[in-house]
Amino acid sequence: QVQLVESGGGSVQAGGSLRLSCAAFGSGYYFTQAYCMGWFRQAPGKEREGVAAIDSDDNTSYEDSVKGRFTVSKDTAKFVMYLQMNSLKPEDTAMYYCAYGLGRNGAATCLSGYGMTYWGKGTLVTVSS
């Protein structure tokens, strides 16, 4: 199994930046095979949506509204994934979750949530205008 723990959320004014981290705990097996990890968010009253994903080949995929503002990356040696969020907008306010999926689905497919087996409990991001 893989346990995921998010951190880095908080309150920020529009135009500000935050960096989210997702620490993965579990057998190293899960990071020697093909896999992908992703960031998802859910705002009150809305469905969960994929924000950014990265696969084991470092291919990335982004939701259209965050392209050019958010950057996903990972440090495989430390088993940590990051989401650098710049130029934040009030509509970015949501609970942000990280997720992991084993297999060769690729970042674009993982962004849809398909094959994402393990999920963290989330970290809250609030952007005020």
Image (cartoon, rainbow, N blue to C red):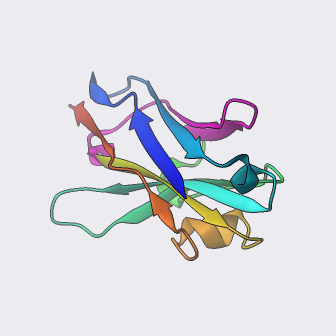
Q: Which residue is drawn at 53% across and 72% down?
A: 112
Residue sticking out furthest to the left: 45
Percent across and percent down for residue 76 are 74, 37
Segment colored magenta: 70-94
Residue situated in front as seen by the camera: 72 or 81: 81
Please state which of residues 18 and 32 is positioned toward the viewer in this rendering.
32
Would you say residue 106 is visible in this rendering? yes
Residue 61 appears in which quarter of the rendering? bottom right
Q: Indicate left or right for 77 with 50 as reference.
A: right
Residue 83 found in image quarter: top right
Look at the image and say whether residue 73 sits in the magenta stretch. Answer: yes
Q: Percent x, y for residue 82?
A: 57, 35
Quadrant including the N terminus: bottom right
Viewer-proximal residue among 83 and 21 = 21
Report the number of discs. Answer: 0
Q: In this view, does 110 lie to the left or right of 35?
A: left
Residue 55 shows in the view: no
Q: Which residue is drawn at 55% across and 42% down?
A: 25
Residue found farthest to the bottom: 114
Q: Is residue 31 magenta?
A: no
Q: Position of residue 53 (x, y in %)?
A: 61, 55
Identify the residue shown where x is 77% and y is 71%: 104
Query: Where 99 falls versus 104 (above or below)?
Result: above
Question: Which residue shows up at 58% across the image and 49% down it?
Answer: 67
Q: Quadrant location of the C terminus? A: top left
